[in-house]
Image (cartoon, rainbow, N blue to C red):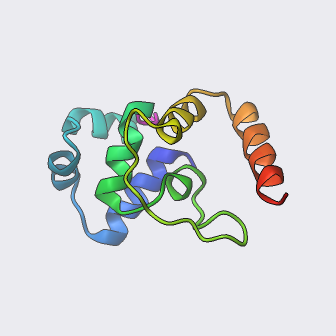
Amino acid sequence: MIISERIFAMLKERGISQKEFAIQTGIAQSTISDWKTKKTNPAADKIMVICDALKVSPYELLTGTEGGGSKQLEYVIIDKASNEYKLVSLYQNLPQEEKNRLLGYSQALSEK
């Protein structure tokens, strides 16, 4: 499932319309509609505002799972100047194969 599909599934679960979501995030309704019809994903700079509106962590939005293995992740708002925000933005722009490699590497580091 791609990120935009997860977003629409979460919107449905929460009973949030596309219009309400657009107002909450400041993202144009036409852009949100494009994610659905064109099967595209949101731009990296929108991930944090989307997470804020849906009350999910970037990990949950990007992977479709809660927490990170045996460790539970907390939902926090990340400042755009932070390394965490930069990491999510960089991750978003990677090809899927590279995303998988990065996730594997991150998992290995967290187990040390």
Residue under the point 34% across and 34% down: 34
Q: Quadrant of residue 29?
A: top left
Q: Quadrant of the C terminus?
A: bottom right
* Tally of numbered tags: 0
Residue 44 sits above or below residue 21 on the image? above
Residue 11 sits above or below residue 87 on the image? below
Instruction: State which region is magenta.
Output: 39-43
Camera-nearest residue between 67 and 31:
67
Camera-nearest residue between 48 and 65:
48
Per the image, is 41 magenta? Answer: yes
The answer to whether residue 70 is left or right of residue 29 is right
Q: Quadrant of residue 17?
A: bottom left
Per the image, is 26 magenta? Answer: no
The answer to whether residue 48 is left or right of residue 112 is left
Q: Please provide percent x and percent y for residue 76.
A: 41, 58
Q: Main secondary structure of the magenta part?
A: loop
Residue 60 sits above or below residue 45 on the image? below
Residue under the point 55% across and 45% down: 2
Q: Please provide percent x and percent y for residue 93.
A: 56, 27
